[in-house]
Amino acid sequence: MASMNDKDYYAILGVASDASTDEIRKSFQKLARTYHPDINKESGAEEKFKEISEAYAVLSDPEKRKRYDAMRAGVPFSGGTYRTGGYSSGRGDPFTDMGFDMWGFPFGGTSTRTATRSRAYNPRPGADVAFELELDAEKARQGVKRGVTFQRYVPCEHCHGQGSVTADHAETCPTCGGRGRMSIDLSDIFGFGVFEVECPECEGTGKVVADPCEYCGGSGRILSADEVVVDVPANSHDGDEIRVTGKGNAGTNGSESGDFVCRVGVRSERLAPAQSSGFQMIGFVTPFIITSIITGFSVGIFTVIFGAYGLYNALRGGLKHDVGWWRNAGRAFARGASSGLMISLFMFAIYSCSFGFGMR
């Protein structure tokens, strides 16, 4: 979600920055009638209605409008200074545009984000950083150590990861009074109803950073390059994970960091999609075959066709594979069997009840 000072509420409502309260109200009423979800069923109308409602909630209130104008202008207001710019706030956990490379090779995938600044105090644990490491069968058996250069969010050194340089604690959001929501009375437009929007300054948390750090934008973390040594143990297999604690993304506002998770890939042990699907089909029909043997019912034609097709897909690459490949095949079979077992037991119970009633 974009921070409050990143949004042009005047442009959203289609009014000038010096528009009167009455002009703002009339523009909102016109837009609200157009985009209200009960009136406009087009895709995106509801999001547009929320956007214009948020803009109106801020600009229709003289005090909130002053705060908003001060934020955008970067001038002192209510004892503090709002500075636009700075470094990425990095809010939220999605970690995109990461570049990985082994030591000794050019580093790529540098991520740059639009400089933003948010006062929202929103402590969240950092997300894990996932890295795929492809090995051949021999190296997987022997085990290897690899150095990996990557990007992650790290705690900001200037505010020690808290988001605020001078203040020790977050303060109540002055825009919403700590509610995290703002109410808009729609009775003068539709005759009834109060619509609530998330507070854009605290982003729904009800708290804001008292003195946002100039370098991290108040989030307590910045994007930086880092390095880690991954120790892949001997006899590793396709799909194994090596976790390095605390080497993932730093959390916001002092929260704990995620982990660096290295996922091992061994091509010779990996099932093709058709093979995996085939083993799941075989697993799925197996409980039905067993149930048929126990109950004496004949195996249905569907079960035979389904199982035969699964067998064809599973073994189309031959039978000569590594032990790890067969282990993954067993896992695919077990996934299919677990689904088939539940359905076959349910059908067996129905047949048992029907047979019991038929004997009476």
Image (cartoon, rainbow, N blue to C red):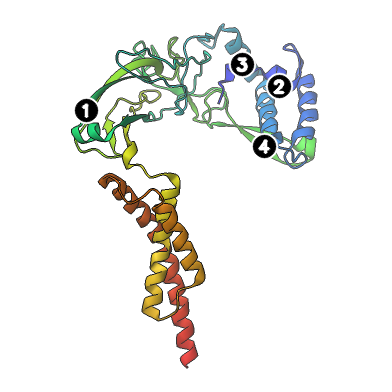
Amino acid type assigned to the residue bearing label 1 in the image: Val
Of label 2 and label 3, which has the lower sequence position?
2
Per the model, the C-alpha gap separating discs 1 and 2 is 55 Å
Q: Position of residue 140 (x, y in %)?
A: 24, 34
Q: Quadrant of residue 227?
A: top left
Q: For this rendering, which residue is in front, 133 or 354? A: 133
Number of the front mark, 3 or 1: 1
For image coordinates 46% across by 16% down, the residue present is 111
Amino acid type indicated by mark 2: Ile
Q: Tag 1 or tag 3, which sits nearer the N-term?
A: 3
The answer to which of marks 1 and 2 sits earlier in the sequence is: 2
Relative placement, left or right, of 49 versus 255 is: right
At numbered mark 2, what does the secondary structure look like: helix, strand or loop?
Answer: helix
Is disc 2 surrounded by few (<14), some (14 to 19) or many (20+) residues within 10 Å? some
Q: Is residue 259 visible?
A: no
Amino acid type indicated by mark 4: Phe
Number of other residues with Cα within 10 Å of mark 1, as a class: few under 14, some 14 to 19, many 20 or more? some
Residue highlighted by disc 4: 195
Question: Residues at badges 3 and 4 in contact (C-beta under 8 Å)?
Answer: no
| Residue 24, placed above or below residue 308 | above
The residue that disc 3 covers is 68
Residue 327 lies left or right of residue 115; in this view the side is left
Dividing the picture into quadrants, the one containing residue 1 is top right
Residue underneath mark 2: 12
Q: Which residue is mark 1?
A: 144
